Amino acid sequence: MGNSYAGQLRTTRFEEVLHNSIEASLRSNTIVPRPVFSQLYLETEQPLAHDGRADNDDEDDEDGSQSNSPPKPYQLKPPPEGCCTTDGFCQAGKDLRLSSLASNPLDVPTGFMLVGVRSPSLPENLLVCAVDRRFLPDERGHNALLGFSGNCLGCGEKGFRYFTEFSNHINLKLSTQPKKQKYLKYHLYRNNQGVLVKGAPILWRGHEGRMKQMGSSPSEGHVTSDEQLPNVALTHPSHTHGSYTAGSHVDPVGLPQQAEVPHPITNGSHAVLPTAQPALNQSGPGRPSATGLHANAGPPKKRHKGWSPESSANSVPESSGKNPPSSSTLSVPFLITNGGRSETAATLSSSQASSTPLSPQWPSVTIPDQLLHTCRRQPVIFKGHGPLPQLAGNVSEVLISSLLHQCYLSSQTLPRVYQHYGPSPIQPLSTEMQILLTVYYLVQLGSDQVPLIEDLEQIFMRSWRESHLSEIRQYQQPQTAATQGRPYGIEVPSNLSGLAQHLSLPPQNQPLTPSQLPWLAQLAASSCGEGVVVLGEQIGSLAQGIQQTFNRLMEGSLENTNYVVIIVTAPGQETQSCVIVTGKHQCRALAESMYSPSDGLKEINHQLSTGIAQELIHYCNSLGQDGDLDSLLDNVTVGSSEPSPLSSGQEHTEERSLKTTHSPNDLQTLCSKDSPSPKERASSPKYTCSEYSIEWREVRPIQLAVARKLLSHVCAIADSSTQNLDLGSFDRISFLILVPPSEVTFQQTVLHLWSSGVLRGLDQECVSQREAERYVVKMDHGAQARIDTLIREAHSNSYTLYILVHDHAHWDVTSDSCRSSDGALGLVDRLLNSRQVKDAPNIVILHVTSFPFALQTQYTRISPYNEIHWPSTFSNDVDLYHERTRYYGVSELLDSTRSGSSLPLMRYDSSFENMTSALEERFPNLHSAVIRTTVLIQHYCIALMAASGRISSSHNLHKHTSVETLEIMQSLLTAAQHCPSHHGHMVVLRIPSVALAAWAHRRLSRVRRQLGLEESFEIILGNPHQSLSIGQSFTDQIKTWLKIHDANWVPQTYLELEALSCILILSGAEPLGESLPRSLKYCDLRVISCSYLQRTTIEQELGLAAYLVRAESRPPHNPGPGSDLLESDADKLSSTDNEEEEGQENGDSPPSSRKQLQSCTENGALDSLLTQSTSSLNVQKRTSDLIQFPSQSQTHPPHSSQSTPYIQPALHHQTHPQAQSSSQGQPIAPLPPHPQIQSQNQLISQVNSCPPPQVVPPSQSRRQHSKSTSSGSLSPTSSSPHLNCSWARGVSRPPSVLLPRALYDIITGTDSGGLPRCTSFLPHISVSWASSFRPLLSKMMTCTEQSLYYRQWTVPCSSHMDSSNRTEGRSDNFHPRRLLLSGPPQVGKTGAYLHFLGILSRMLIRLMEVDIYDEDDINHNSQVDDRQYHPPTASWPNPDVMRTMPFDYTIHDPKYDDISSVYNPAYKPIAEVNPVRQEDVYLRRRTTRIKLSKYAAYNTYHHCEQCHQYLGFNPRYQMYESTLHAFTFTHLLIGEEVQLYFIIPKSKEHYFSFSQPGGQLESMRLPLTSDWSPDCIKSPIFTPTTGRHEHGLFNLYHAMDGASHLHILVVKEYEMAVYKKYWPNHIMLVLPTVFNGAGIGAAHFLIKELSYHNLELERTRRLEGGGPAGDVWPFIILADDSCVMWNTVDLDAHSGPVEHAVSLKQVLQHMEACPDLATYGLCGIRKWSSRGLRGNKHRDSFSRGHLHDFLLLNVDLSQNVQYNQNRFTCHDVDFVLRLHSAGLLVCRFNSFSVMKKQIAIGGYRTFIIKTKMTDVPTSVGPSQYVCAPDSKHLFLATPAQLLLEKYLQHTSQKLFPLSTKNYTHPALSVDCYLNLGPEVTVCFVSSRPHSINISTTGLLFSGLLLCFADSFVTPGFLKKFSFLKGATLCVISADRSSLRQTVGRLELEEEWRFRLSDEFQTANAKEDQPLFFLTGKHI
């Protein structure tokens, strides 16, 4: 142990070695002999070590094996060069001797112990080292982990993982194999003087001494001690990396009484359990422990190098490999977990048996007559290798299964990855090895355990990997020297890290031969006595072996045999095998597992209808000496004053019969006349509970988050390039919710829908909950018509988006071709997967399920990108969504079983299991469900009778039921009595069979009626096909609580039963999505089937108990004591029918406590317990400990309970294997007293003198991990409603779950990845594993990764609806409009998707609406001009009239309310409120929501079929096919040639002329003025844009109403690629590189100049073509990229002007049709405002003034007026002023308006001021935009013109102080308009000759602004104007020299005073060409 050397096969002959090693194992008296194969493949020089004995003696270490070959000497590894080799020193030269280190301080890490090491060369001294205490035995010699972990205390080196390595380091210089047992001799400790001295010797002999009480031979090895076997389970569990072939450290050879003490295995090896987990299910004689571990279970003999002792103490290493725990933890029938009944199950009838493929050459086997009757079992034959012989005779008495055969085949089918590289050394497992592994696996199974095929499959896989590990590596990672040649103890690569156990298998060059197989198998089977019989050596054929097995069965010689393995190894033939299961328990389990779920229910119905179960009923009715159950009930009924509706005989006949399978409704509950009704109690003012509230109608934050995730996925589908969903084309939604055929689920969904308010926004006509039912449909026969109607509606309403919500989607995944006879299954496939639904572009399917695994296969229809998983609410105990609730689901239930701090919420009932096991033996022909249900209902009836107090205590009824059932009924009866409003809780009794459930309902109802308890609680039969039915009195009670006044209202869902005391018998093959109320306290699943082990099946049953716990309560991960017990009971009935046995089983309950409880309960009353002072004191101490010391009990050592003075109730030992944890001091609250001793409640409160709980604050009570105490709650002084109301206490804790023992063992077990055992099962019955060579799920996997795992490793069966979803040539076949929402059960998925429907509807409305700027005009004139220049009906302006109209210099556009107003003599300003700064304008501009008209412009997110060709989806041209063309022209202002680039799609080339096809671009074609077409726009549309490639409104298809038009996007060079990507079919005009940093002025400048140049080219081209040159159309359109809709005004005689939407085509065609349009230089339309028409009733149809945003420009007339290419702001104001001064007509069509959409992204108004030093925007104030020339200043990386404009805008108060708020004395600006801020008025004048200017006579100006003054500005021109004294002058030039030249040329120094400090420049570096300006004052 501990070595790291490579191993080789010894040279001794194989048979001899094997024989000798097996003999040694048989002679060994240890509990776990060494595995066979671990002795065959050892190290080269190492002798065959005998690991079956405790190695302590020196001589034992020298020769541990009993092989005949002599041991070879141990060769020491040579020490490294230069290291110390002195004895007593380590290789680092540090002294390790005890004599030297005795007084030295030593560093001993936590968890380590000082150990004295014996050195052979220093016999007089010890060496000191530190060893991890886990690898050392305890004081009894037990619990030592295999392996080693130690530190050197000399040099301080740590982390020695191998004792061999450590012995070399400390220079032991050994001649034999280093073993820790031989050299780690003594404990060391410090004495009183602090000196380190030798202590007690280390006991390495613990196992040997303990096992002397056990027989040494397999036949005699019975456990004889009641105490030592439980001690085995107390050992520290850890990894068990065995080396035996099946992966177990347990050697089946020589294992004493394996059937008595079955080992939990993980893929054939020991289960790994946490160290902190206390003793599990300590077993007494005849009580096999399915979860206990043997004491020597430990780390691997040869570990991974990466194995650490820490990992073994806590959990199994995480793995991607497959290593599920084995079925040895199973104690009931389950074998078939890989699904299909028809594909893998056995034959069930003679016809099926005869149809099995058999070989005719073998002789037939005759099944003996009366085999079933004689043997009382139905043998199961597992087909193995080779054909089975023909069966003859009574074949119906034998079952045949092909599961094992399929497992063999699957494990021999190598993955493709190992087949693609030609000849490969990798071979599958041989037939012989498979058979031998099967024998080993069967040997390890206990007598009550059933084989699980998946475990055997995993054993095969691990064995194969171990035997081919080196070859596998070459496909996964490079092979290193450290991993070569190590077939034993090999380091497992990452992909196999989950194989917690190692298998040591023969290498392929020495395979197991057929001749060796039979006797090897027989030797292996001999370890378990008669449990497994191998027939092989004398068998010539399978037929002979099977016939011999049948004969031995008839003789009774196989009575104690569970499995017969038949092996045929004839020379020259293939090895054949089969396995015959002969154990009674195993045969029953396998037979029932071979039924499909529906066939199983049919068999139950058949047994009930034929009356086979009558004997069972009579047997259960008998109470032995205590009488007969029915007689006791009859006595109660006769003695009662209440009349019985049926005679006694009639009642007995009805109730004792199980033949009736229908649920009767004829039993009416009898209302008690002596006590007030529940309704009277609830309605009375003094009976009011303030704690009651209904919360399931609320939408929680996490539901909102999930709804938004759903919405984002839908938007992602719409935004994708696949064009699968066009959200923009829908104006509303409709939906249909599909639910399983459960009436309660249907009504529940309708209730949620109506309560959510979704319909109020979608369907105004839906005014009642009943009308909401048309949106929900059950998937039954009526669903077809509903779906067909929806398809027709979807086809006719293309603007409506239909959402099909498939709730509980895992319920029906059956293919339509395999639908059931009743037509229910397969309906989903027929409806949702039909071509009409799949191809409809306006239907989206949303699957909703808690178990999505069946929809996640290789052929799934749902894309992994369309999966939405429920998020985690808490992360590191941080509430991510601020929830008031915490979800408590399956994982939390599992956590409660491991916490050890209290009674787990999930447990099993051992008393019930014992009784059912006995009855299954007695009634072998009955289905186990019938037996278990009968026993359970009998328990409930007896418990009800006992708890009612109506039966005399002398009958000892409590002995005939289980404590769990008695507690449930006690709690149910007393809970409602403690609440003023009679609030109680619910008990769910899950009975899958509808017939059994109906019988149970009748039986319980009869007992309740005879006991007179009709008003105490209700018994409800939950049949999925029937409506909910409860008594009228209980209905009235619920109506009072819910404040419902409708006389006809009845509850229709389980949710509406909130706080009602009731037993709900929930039937049906599986839950169908029914939600349970928060008052659920007990979820009794004891009779659910354990035969169908799929993950979905198990988890959906457990999902019934899923719960939302109030977050303010105790954290659910640490449930307090008594979390599911009674809160306010005075005492506890703690007896069971086998107390003594249970106490012995658990082994830790004090005998005094057991005797005391037994004496109390056997007396039949609790009065004795109340009168015994000892018990009272115990109760008192228990209660006081619970309140005052809540955590003390959690710190007891494992055996401290023996000294605990207070009562240890046997309930814990009986119901849960973690008896240790639950009895260490965590008390439980007692059960309520009988009614006849209710008067003693006061006595209880007096005896229990601890502080009453009501004085403890709620928060403190939660910190104490206690919901209640055993006293005080019943005290009359209790005043808190929360403490009095059981319901109020119950909503803060999850319900308790009772499971079958078998299912409990599966669920609580974990696989190698740390996940629950059930997660490694097949996910669904309709899918199968794609390969046996799959890894296991990892604990670290997210939901998405789990989905990808199932998508890779599962395939649908032929009956699955996705099995046909394959398309040749495609890797996937996903439906583009199909989503999957998955989340845990009962978490709130319905509310989430309902809210999603609501926000989706609102989003569609939102998509149809846009935020439009809705602002009033600014700068209204106080003197309104009432003159009407044009008649109201004028269509076009009159040029002559327009010239007579005054030009309105005033700016009215509200977007310019932050700029300088333009001086207008005719304008009289109105006193304004505080002006708004520019920074606030964008945020504060007023908008309104307007629904898009059909003529709107759209951005890139709009996709509709009509737009496909417009956007580039033209079938004639390839998508994105376009060409780049250069276009060059010369312009004087720029001073050089301008080269522009056009990107022209192929589909748009006809708008241009080329020198030749595909040649040089010559011009853009322009129409003639005389041309006209109703479907054509003549003017080219230019849209300059930046930063809005997604949001710019460039899709004008709908706006143009389909008219042909030329639209050109003007983009900057660096944005060319992204615009081309989003708008592939648009023409792009790319600005030159120098304009990348330019503003909007540069874009308009180039557009205008290019258009004029193109106009000249077109005129030339027309002349060359012989046409008139002057007739070319000279107009272009300059449109903003945010123009969304256009409107026109109609004059209505009645209501005045009316504005409505109109297409852009109509607007442009109307303007282009203007008769005198050529006389106008610029035309435009007004900006829309909702008050535009009402605000100005006297507005003329046309006006002269400023135009913005949408312009019709005459490039011919305006050729001499250019846009200022340097401008960033107000360029259009400057251009219009210069255009008007040039004498050109400017006309605005007021009958049209444009709506501008608010776009918060991009645009030319977004400027970033940043420094040259960094690209990160910094906060730079406007004062820093300029600086003094030649000064050291922070230069800015911003264009100089922008800095100047911003500086003038923000510093106008300082620059022009006299102009501030002085409209009558404006600042004079010559030839340009610059914004000087909103407080300064600018008077614009033009210096051009013949220009039109305002009259400035008598006007005094407060400032003068000269910006780039040209030659037209002369001194004489300036002297025309007068200035105020002190007026400010600002002269701007491009450089300092031109600035001085301008001052000199204009003789400014004559009237203006300048200073040197008044010269500035923009804050630009010299290379960035700053602008300079000079300021001065007027003299």
Image (tube, rainbow, N blue to C red):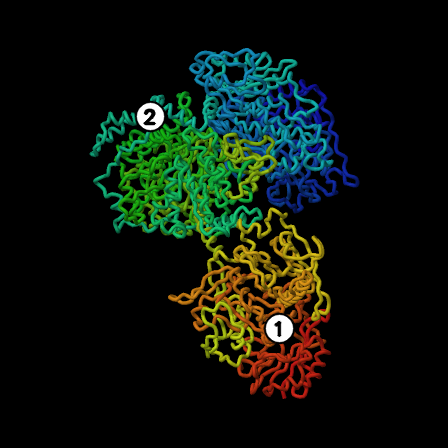
Q: Residues within 10 Å of mark 2 (few under 14, many from 20)?
A: many
Task: Check the image and name the residue furthest to the front.
Answer: 1666
Point out the tag, 2 or 1, that comes first from the N-terminus. 2
Q: Nearer the viewer, residue 1132 or 338?
A: 338
- Quarter of the view holding residue 168: top right
Instruction: State the mark number for residue 1845.
Output: 1
The local secondary structure at tag 1 comes to helix
The local secondary structure at tag 2 comes to loop
Relative vertical location of residue 798 with respect to residue 1237 in this rendering, above or below: below
Q: Nearer the viewer, residue 422 or 1765?
A: 1765
Coordinates of residue 1928 in the picture (x, y in percent): 61, 83
Instruction: State the mark number for residue 658.
Output: 2
Q: Is residue 529 visible?
A: no
- Amino acid type, label 1: Glu
Coordinates of residue 686 in the picture (x, y in percent): 26, 51
| 1157 left or right of 368 in image | left
Q: Quadrant of the N terminus?
A: top right
| 503 left or right of 221 in image | right
Mark nearer the viewer, 2 or 1: 1
Coordinates of residue 1189 in the picture (x, y in percent): 44, 46
Instruction: State the mark number for residue 1520.
Output: none
Relative vertical location of residue 466 with respect to residue 1482 in this rendering, above or below: above
- Quarter of the view holding residue 1720: bottom right
- Tell whether label 1 touches label 2 (CB within 8 Å): no
Coordinates of residue 649 in the picture (x, y in percent): 24, 25
Q: CA distance from mark 2 to mark 1?
A: 96 Å
- Amino acid type, label 2: Leu
Q: Nearer the viewer, residue 947 or 441?
A: 441
Q: Is residue 7 visible?
A: yes
